[in-house]
Image (tube, rainbow, N blue to C red):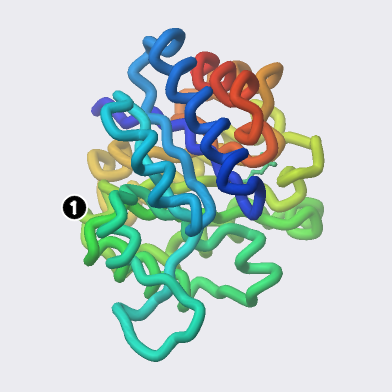
Amino acid sequence: MVRKKIVAGNWKMNHTLAEGEKLTSEIVNMVADEVHNGAQVVLAVPYLHIPGTARLLKGADGIALGAQNCHEEESGAFTGEISAGMLRSAAVEYVILGHSERRAYFGEKDVLISKKVDIALKEGLIPIYCCGETLDIRDQGNHLDFVAKQISEALFHLDAKTISGIVIAYEPVWAIGTGRTASPNQAQEMHEYLRKHLAGKYGKDAADSITILYGGSCKPDNAAEIFSGPDVDGGLIGGASLKSRDFVDIIKAL
Ligand code: PGA
């Protein structure tokens, strides 16, 4: 089973529209000139950047548009919120859900995130479901079961066919924005464990078809080593996705 290889950039709350346009244009040109490994690139930009980025990505081979969140309801009186259907209508293909910053600062729990996964799928978006343990949990040695449980709670209501189309991003909280990455062995160990956990519920074929990304201080100089794990199918990149040279070098490392 050939899994999709993905490098997704998570811009978080960064860049004015002009800065975003410049970054996207640079990435589009560099990917066209330099990337030949068939990787799927995703730019998960702030909501406001979506229409402009969509225009710049028209005709850009292998680069898809992503969002960083959506609301769990289809529509209605939810002032200030953005629906999955709106995103889809704006040419968004992927949506990051359950990022650890949403969990930590906005109180998102897996019960809520599972609703977001459902509405995203219903509207035709591909969820990038984020999971990962804090340093405390890793120090206690409970990280493997903790992350497996996150996945069970948020995703195990789906059927095998549906879950096969989902992307999972393992992002140890202690590695996000800290400059401290999981070692290639730590990443592979977790990814392999999660894939076995998925296989236990859905069978090997479904588990083998799910793309599992690593995220957390991924940089051009450590990406190739992290991506070398057989169960590591690419990366979700924060800080380094804000610089075109670094981001494209990470794509090339895949
Ligand atoms: P980072 O962020 O690459 O800046 O550590 C990763 C993420 O939060 O997705």
Residue at position x 27%, y 47% in the image = 165
Q: Relative to the observer, which residue lies in front, 47 or 141?
A: 47
Q: Relative to the observer, which residue lies in front, 142 or 156?
A: 156
- In the rendered view of the protein, which quadrant contains the N terminus? top left
Q: Give the crowd class for mark 1: few <14, some 14-19, many >=20 residues within 10 Å.
A: few
Q: Position of residue 121 (x, y in %)?
A: 27, 61
Report whether 221 appears left or right of 108.
right
Classify the position of ligand 1 by quadrant: top left, top right, bottom left or bottom right. Answer: top right
Q: Position of residue 100 (x, y in %)?
A: 63, 59
Q: Which residue is mark 1?
A: 161
Q: Is mark 1 within 8 Å of ligand 1?
A: no
> Furthest-front residue in view?
18
Assign a secondary structure to mark 1.
helix
The disc labelled 1 sits on which kind of residue? Answer: Lys
Residue at position x 64%, y 74% in the image = 106
Q: Is residue 104 above or below residue 210?
A: below
Residue at position x 48%, y 46% in the image = 44
User: How many badges with numbers are in the image?
Assistant: 1
Q: Is residue 145 above or below residue 221?
A: below
Residue at position x 49%, y 51% in the image = 49
Q: Is residue 197 visible?
A: no
Question: Which image quadrant for residue 37?
Answer: top left
Q: Is residue 164 visible?
A: yes
Report whether 193 appears left or right of 202.
right
Question: Which image quadrant for residue 125?
Answer: bottom left
Q: Position of residue 182 (x, y in %)?
A: 70, 35
